[in-house]
Amino acid sequence: GIQVEQSPPDLILQEGANSTLRCNFSDSVNNLQWFHQNPWGQLINLFYIPSGTKQNGRLSATTVATERYSLLYISSSQTTDSGVYFCAVKGVTTDSWGKLQFGAGTQVVVTP
Amino acid sequence: SQTIHQWPATLVQPVGSPLSLECTVEGTSNPNLYWYRQAAGRGLQLLFYSVGIGQISSEVPQNLSASRPQDRQFILSSKKLLLSDSGFYLCAWSGWGGRAEAFFGQGTRLTVV
């Protein structure tokens, strides 16, 4: 199946700092999503971005499908940005089509 | 709009007892449905995937099973729970097809004692 690798595994930021999270995937994808898991465990949809660039407030994301990676940018971080950020993809092959596969996540801690 | 309901939110069950977790989706038809488990730590492991009624793909051999008795209902079951079944279980839905965006329920935190 398709492999998804996220880096860094952990990130500690001071409030107001900027950061970049990376997601590499091993094969072509139909779908790429970024999620934020809050302290209560809920997965919040951040971006649906199989290709291109999107922005939502202080967050933005870029996927370069031909090079098999996606980046999530957090600007002017706030303590509410703390949590785990996941990248997830659906592949194009028979065994990966339709199945949303997750990376291991990046644990972000924003300190006041 | 579409919504996904998952219950219960928390569950404490003794070893050897049965399990039934239910997930329902409203506002859409013929969704793809998923069950994931998140053990202590971070990773989400895909357990089961369904593209239609009675069509279940099992991704990982384990003590669990899934059923889809109705189009928008997905049930996760076990006949006898093990300690290793403890974890955070998440149900998700997406539209049909590889490109469709997925959305998650609130999750069930299961502790087997």
Image (spheres, rainbow, N blue to C red):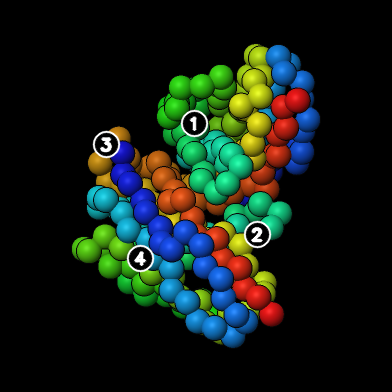
Q: Residues within 10 Å of mark 1 (few under 14, many from 20)?
A: many
Q: CA distance from mark 3 to mark 1?
A: 16 Å
Q: CA distance from mark 2 to mark 3?
A: 33 Å
Q: Chain of mark 1?
A: B
Which residue is under mark 2? A38
- Horizontally, residue B100 falls left or right of residue A83, namely left
Outermost residue on the left side: it is: A66
Q: Chain of mark 4?
A: A
Q: CA distance from mark 4 to mark 3?
A: 23 Å
Q: CA distance from mark 4 to mark 2?
A: 21 Å
Which residue is under mark 4? A70
Query: Along the polypeptide, which appears first: circle 2 or circle 3?
Result: 2
What amino acid type should be assigned to the residue bearing mark 4? Ser
Which residue is under mark 1? B48
Q: Chain of mark 2?
A: A
Choose mark 4 or mark 1, whichever is in front: 4
What amino acid type should be assigned to the residue bearing mark 2? Asn
Establish whether labels 3 and 1 are both on one chain: no
Figure check: A12 above or below A86: below
Dot 2 lies on which element? loop
Dot 3 lies on which element? loop
Which residue is under mark 3? A94
Dot 4 lies on which element? strand
